[in-house]
Amino acid sequence: GTITRANGTSLVFGTPGNTAGAAFSLPATLFSAAPSITSLTINRDNKLTWTNQQLTLNNTLTLTGGEFDFNGQILITNAAIPFARTSGTFTPGAASTMSFTANVTPFTIPDGFFTTSPATITNLTLNRGAGVLMTLGNQELNVTGTTTITAATGGILEVKNADLQIATLA
């Protein structure tokens, strides 16, 4: 079967008191189309792997436990605060694209967000609005493909206590 999402859909994997279970991979054809969801919460003791579909996130990816392995997919977010973390980590995957769009709220990728440092992705796009600040937390990010900061509307990419390695800047 497949899931057809409705407007306002939020996904939660693991709730307080129900975080156990073996590592799990979502089936490659779980969604009937590349999902656009409101929010996603990962609260598991073991890894959850996203497979084979782009994800558009309109609100926050919240990590409260476990590892979320994005498996090299495309993540597009227009959330005011794209990421929140109390525990748990995010593994983008070397083939991943992370795209931050259409929101004028400054944000910081939380410290300890990535499972390993440097986290490696293929492409990074910043198109949030003129003067909007995106700050890289305390971990390294390695972009092996293209980093795009859209002229006049892209925003500002701030690197404080981290390292940013860029192969190509567009």
Image: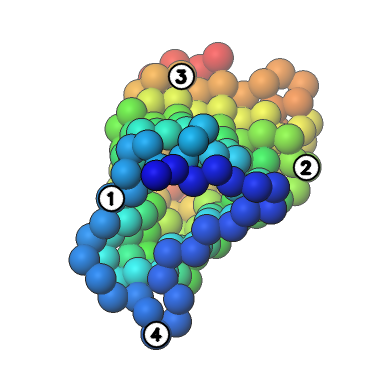
Q: Residues within 10 Å of mark 4 (few under 14, many from 20)?
A: few
Q: Which residue is mark 1?
A: 25
Contact between marks 4 and 1 (CB within 8 A): the answer is no
Q: Is residue 46 above or below residue 118?
A: below
Is residue 15 left or right of 21 when viewed as pictured? right
Q: Earlier in the sequence, mark 4 or mark 1?
A: 4
Please name the colour scheme applied to the rendered image: rainbow
Mark 2 vs mark 3, CA separation in Å: 23 Å
> Is residue 61 shown left or right of residue 14?
right
Which residue carries the number 3 mark? 146
Identify the residue shown where x is 74% and y is 41%. 103
Residue 65 vertical position relative to residue 59 in the rendered view, above or below: below
Amino acid at circle 1: Ser
Badge 2 density bin: few <14, some 14–19, many ≥20, Cα 10 Å:
some
On the image, numbered disc 4 is attached to which residue? 17
Q: Are marks 2 and 3 in contact (CB under 8 Å)?
A: no
Structural distance between the alpha carbons of marks 3 and 4: 42 Å
In what quadrant of the picture does the C terminus appear? top right
Packing grade of label 3 (10 A; few <14, some 14-19, many >=20) is some
